[in-house]
């Protein structure tokens, strides 16, 4: 990350940050919320930086597409943040993100380019008690240990999956530690559909029991992104509330929306795909290899192989799930073309299929990383729909506490 003049002056003020692996996260989080002490910063350093920001009236020097709201209605944290799909959805509803974490450096660069904050790295290195107070804990916790592709790959390598995966699977328990330490009123988690059946249901049972032990009531359900965008993308949503704060809520107050609210404008596929675009047209070699691969599996009566839309693109069509490996050959979803080989979806088209504004959202990384980051992201309007339920509960809690 390129240092701004403000960064450099803060580093002169607090030289110990020069040696900090989380230097950029500390500085950008402080510039975003100067009155909130964040992890890995002692009281004296916090006071010095806050004094500097106030004296210089600094709000950061980065012009970003998605700044925090001027008047925040609530606070949230963004764990395993990726490129900020959760952040964007909750900021749209008036939320202020007071802490973010993402261990992939390339995703962190994209996050910074769009929100002006560089997320902290490995959440396991953060003391849960030092995370700022917040109203909603958001986390798209790592799905590879639970996904079908992830499980197959790890099994073939003789590696553990789910909670037995010592690198990623245990990261759910980092969320549990934060819940125990900070007691946010509300939770919003997301994961792949396969988490519900992983390890014969023992994984999801462990998750449920963990929430119960912490006195959180949590709804768990599959939501398909195709209701908000023309992409079939099933994900498991976890919406939860602190029973010690809310008591017992009924289904009219607490639920997981399966469809958009009245008035939502659905972006049909023919408005997303540019039929005049020929970029990323498959070479003869790649297209022939995909056809051979599909024929091979068809003879074995299984469904592996490429998927291709119908020509021409019509409003009622829906794409298949765009994965993190989409950049390799586009086999997840190919766009047919007249008189030439099919093509991959462009980066802008994939962004639209995830609910991002391709005219605003920035990718400072290479195109391969950008495709991967979008494939790992969430459908923003679907996240926002469920977040509305949680924000409504917060408003009720505020009235109750007055």
Image: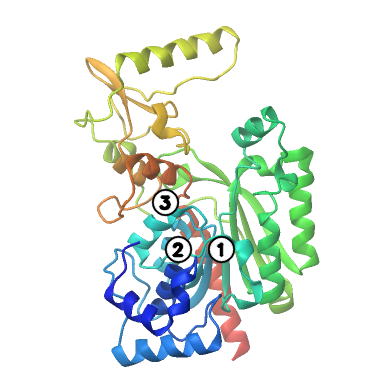
Identity of the residue drawn at 73% across and 73% down:
243
Work out whether mark 2 precedes mark 3 in sequence or the reverse, and give the earlier one.
Answer: 2
Q: Quadrant of residue 338?
A: top left
Residues at marks 1 and 3, CA–CA distance in whole angstroms: 20 Å
* Mark 3 residue element: helix
Give the residue at mark 2.
Answer: 87
Q: Is residue 276 left or right of residue 202?
A: left
Residue plotted at (44% across, 23% down)? 307
How packed is label 1: few (under 14 Cα within 10 Å), some, or many (20 or more)?
many
Is residue 249 at least partly visible in the picture?
no
Residue 250 placement: quadrant: bottom right
Q: Residue at x 50, y 40 (%)?
A: 233
Alpha-carbon distance for marks 1 and 2? 8 Å
In this rendering, position of residue 153 left or right of residue 101 = right
Residue 106 tag number: 3
Tag of residue 138: 1
What is the secondary structure assignment of the residue under circle 2?
helix
Pick the residue in front: 264 or 167.
167
């Amino acid at each position: 990350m390129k240092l701004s003049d403000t960064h450099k002056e803060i580093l002169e003020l607090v030289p110990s940050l020069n040696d900090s692996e989380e230097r950029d996260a500390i500085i950008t989080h402080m510039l975003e919320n100067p009155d909130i002490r964040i992890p890995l910063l002692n009281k004296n350093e916090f006071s010095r930086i806050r004094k500097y920001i106030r004296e210089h009236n600094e709000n950061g020097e980065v012009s970003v597409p998605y700044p925090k709201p001027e008047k925040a209605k609530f606070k949230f944290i963004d764990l395993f943040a990726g490129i900020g799909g959760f952040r964007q959805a909750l900021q749209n509803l008036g939320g202020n993100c007071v802490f973010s974490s993402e261990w992939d450096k390339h995703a962190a660069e994209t996050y910074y380019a769009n929100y002006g904050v560089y997320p902290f790295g490995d959440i396991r290195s953060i003391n849960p008690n030092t995370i700022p107070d917040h109203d909603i804990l958001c986390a798209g916790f790592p799905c590879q240990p639970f996904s079908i592709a992830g499980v197959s790959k790890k099994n073939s390598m003789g590696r553990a999956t789910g909670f037995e995966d010592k690198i990623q699977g245990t990261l759910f328990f980092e969320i549990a530690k934060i819940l125990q330490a900070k007691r946010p009123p509300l939770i919003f988690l997301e994961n792949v559909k396969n988490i519900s059946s992983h390890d014969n249901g023992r994984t999801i049972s462990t998750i449920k029991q963990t929430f119960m032990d912490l006195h959180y009531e949590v709804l768990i359900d599959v939501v398909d992104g195709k209701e908000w965008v023309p992409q079939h993308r099933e994900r498991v949503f976890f919406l939860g509330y602190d029973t010690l704060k809310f008591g017992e809520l009924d289904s009219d107050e607490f639920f997981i929306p399966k469809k958009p609210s009245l008035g939502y404008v659905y972006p049909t596929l023919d408005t997303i795909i540019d039929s005049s675009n020929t970029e990323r047209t498959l070479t003869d070699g790649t297209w022939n290899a995909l056809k051979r691969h599909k024929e091979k599996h068809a003879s074995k009566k299984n469904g592996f192989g490429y998927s291709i839309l119908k020509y021409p693109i019509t409003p009622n069509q829906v794409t298949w799930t765009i994965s993190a490996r989409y950049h390799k050959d586009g086999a997840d979803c190919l766009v047919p073309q007249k008189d030439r080989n099919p093509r991959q979806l462009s980066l802008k088209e994939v962004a639209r299929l995830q609910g991002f504004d391709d005219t605003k959202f920035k990718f400072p990384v290479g195109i391969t990383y950008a495709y991967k980051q979008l494939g790992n992201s969430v459908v923003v309007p679907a996240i926002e729909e469920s977040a509305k339920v949680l924000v409504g509960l917060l408003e009720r809690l505020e009235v109750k506490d007055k």
